[in-house]
Image (cartoon, grey):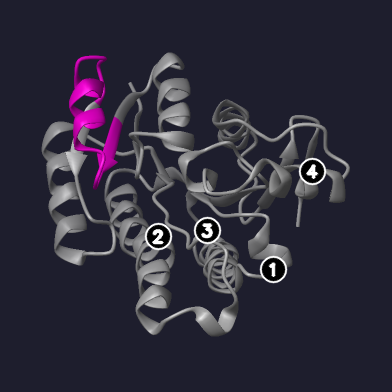
Amino acid sequence: MKTALITGGARGIGIAVAEKLKNAGYNVVISYHSSTEKAKALQDKGFYTVYADVSNASDVKKMFGEIERRFPRLDVLINNAGVALKQKLFLDVSAEEFDDVFNVDVKGVFLCTKEAVGYMLKTGGTGDVISVSSIWGGEGASCEVVYSAAKGAVNIFTRALSKELAETDICVQAIAPALVETDMNAHLSEDDKKAFLNERGLKVPLYPEDVADAVLKLLQTRKNGAVTVIEAKDKIYEI
């Protein structure tokens, strides 16, 4: 049975992906940071949960140590853990807020991917790494400068690492959703959401399950280095 790790997997896109993979026959490991109660409830549903601050190197090493002791291999890493600021002007963003976003959204991807790839290489040299980016990582967005920059870094990280691992069977990809109905976007007003959808010619926002379905397709197609945007169920393309 294959094993998958989803970081930040206790809610939103993470739990949707976790449930899809579990239904597909995977052992599913969910890392969590602040969602302690949700993580405890998920253990009763057959998920293996482990605490980790993905921006902390020692936490990440400890997490992978636990995974290695419990499972013979890791087949899939989904870098889903992420944070975002509420929309604000660039000049109002503090250095501390910048660090918070980049520590989780970029450093977290680096730390988890480094451990996962090392584990995959020593257990057969095969596996999949998919990082959750954002449509803003390719386009940029007003009042989302830091978040856009962080997700842009994830996109380039994906492309660069895919080239470095091209001679292996480790496939590195990213998925870049548009507007998804999650806690991260709960601060947006209905007018803000409608404006975004109208601007892009979309009728409805995405839901976590839509992104999870797209992730499963990426695991099947395995196009190394691909950064795939999903704006709607029927609007999916590479950038």
Binning the other alpha carbons within 10 Å of mark 2 as few (below 14), some (14 to 19) or many (20 upward) gives many
Magenta stretch: includes residue 77:
no
Task: Please determine whether, in this image, residue 203 is positioned above or below residue 134.
Answer: above
Q: Amino acid at mark 4?
A: Leu
Q: Secondary structure at mark 4?
A: helix
Q: Please name the residue shown 51% across and 80% down the image.
A: 92
Q: Do the CB atoms of the residues marked 4 and 3 lie less than 8 Å apart?
A: no
Q: Residue sitting at 56 percent across and 26 percent down?
A: 209
Q: Tell me the mark number nearer the camera, choosing from 2 and 1.
A: 1
Q: Earlier in the sequence, mark 2 or mark 4?
A: 2
Q: Mark 3: which secondary structure?
A: loop
- Pointer 3 residue: 167
Q: Position of residue 144 (x, y in %)?
A: 60, 67
Q: Closer to the camera: disc 4 or disc 3?
A: 4
Residue with the mark numbered 2:
109
Disc 1 to disc 3, C-alpha distance: 32 Å
Q: Which residues are magenta?
A: 29-47
Label placed on residue 140:
1
Callouts 2 and 1 close, C-beta under 8 Å: no
Tell whether 194 sits left or right of 25.
right
First along the sequence among labels 1 and 3: 1
Are the residues tagged 1 and 4 within 8 Å (C-beta)? no
Q: Residue at x 35, y 78 (%)?
A: 96
Asked if 143 appears above or below 213 in the picture, the reply is below
Tell me the element at label 2. Answer: helix
The local crowd at label 3, few if under 14, some if 14 to 19, many if 20 or more residues have their Cα within 10 Å, is: few
The CA distance from mark 4 to mark 3 is 41 Å
Query: In terms of sequence position, does the residue under pointer 4 or pointer 3 come before the other?
Result: 3
Q: Earlier in the sequence, mark 2 or mark 1?
A: 2
Q: Which residue carries the number 4 mark?
A: 197
Q: Is residue 237 visible?
A: no
